[in-house]
Image (cartoon, rainbow, N blue to C red):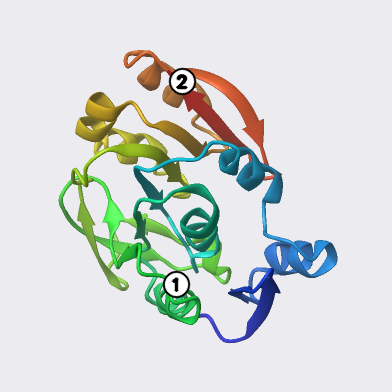
Amino acid sequence: MVETQVKQVFNGITSLITENDPEHVRYVELMHTWHEIHMLEHIAKTKRDGAIIDIGANVGQHSVFFATHCTTGNVYSFEPNPDSFRLLMKNISDNGLKNVYPFLAAIGQRGKGWLNPSERSGTTGIQYDKETFPVIITPLLDYGKTDLIKIDVEGMEVETLLNCRAVIEKYRPEIYIETFDNFELITEHLSHFGYTMKGRFNNAPTYWFSV
């Protein structure tokens, strides 16, 4: 459960983060900048006008950055944890963002799953065999021209990609995907669409794939 919040302000843009995610908080407080800033700065080098999809948005720090630095289009943010989603909504509201559309849901095969509880808000996953908090799971819909998809889904990377297939086939967006164990499967899957891995970012390994 999200209990304690820390507010940071970056060039007039506010971001609430949570003290039960110690690595995240420590980095932001010590560096006085956005979490995973090197990846974000890399993404911001290209100005976009299409949609950005943030799958596993947590409290929305990346979604806020995408909306204010990376695109003149819309950001669609998916977060299944209700505590994190509440802060995602607040971060959107506090910054007056009109181009971020949040969804309390996970991307996957349509149906219902259950939260896999974690003490850290950023490491909550989905499970199917134990009833905790119910989660809506849905394939990714087509929101129009899509330039980028960011995925941070705690081990569910392959299932998520499978249920983004229509959007990936149609628009060939850049993909940034965090994974510890599924890199080979992800690389093989995306190779069928012409993708290759172009770079790696962050302590929690996040790979950049592009056509």
78 left or right of 121 in image: left
Q: Which mark is residue 78?
A: none
Q: Nearer the viewer, mark 2 or mark 1?
A: 1
Q: Name the kind of residue labelled 2 in the image.
A: Thr
Q: Is residue 47 above or below residue 124?
A: above
* In front of the other: 169 or 44: 44
Q: Position of residue 170 (x, y in %)?
A: 22, 27
Q: Position of residue 36 (x, y in %)?
A: 67, 51
Residue pointed to by mark 2: 187
Dot 2 or dot 1: first in sequence order is: 1
* In front of the other: 111 or 107: 107
Would residue 128 be seen by someone viewing this image from the given angle? no
Q: Mark 1: few, some, or many residues within 10 Å (few <14, many ≥20)?
A: many
Q: Is residue 155 above or below residue 190?
A: below
Q: Secondary structure at mark 1?
A: helix
Q: Secondary structure at mark 2?
A: helix
Q: CA distance from mark 2 to mark 1?
A: 30 Å
118 left or right of 172 in image: right
Q: Which mark is residue 88?
A: 1
Residue at horizontal 54 percent and vertical 36 percent from the top? 46
Residue at horizontal 41 percent and vertical 39 percent from the top? 148
Q: Mark 2: few, some, or many residues within 10 Å (few <14, many ≥20)?
A: some
Q: Position of residue 24 (x, y in %)?
A: 68, 63
Q: Position of residue 210 (x, y in %)?
A: 47, 23
Residue at horizontal 62 percent and vertical 26 percent from the top? 199
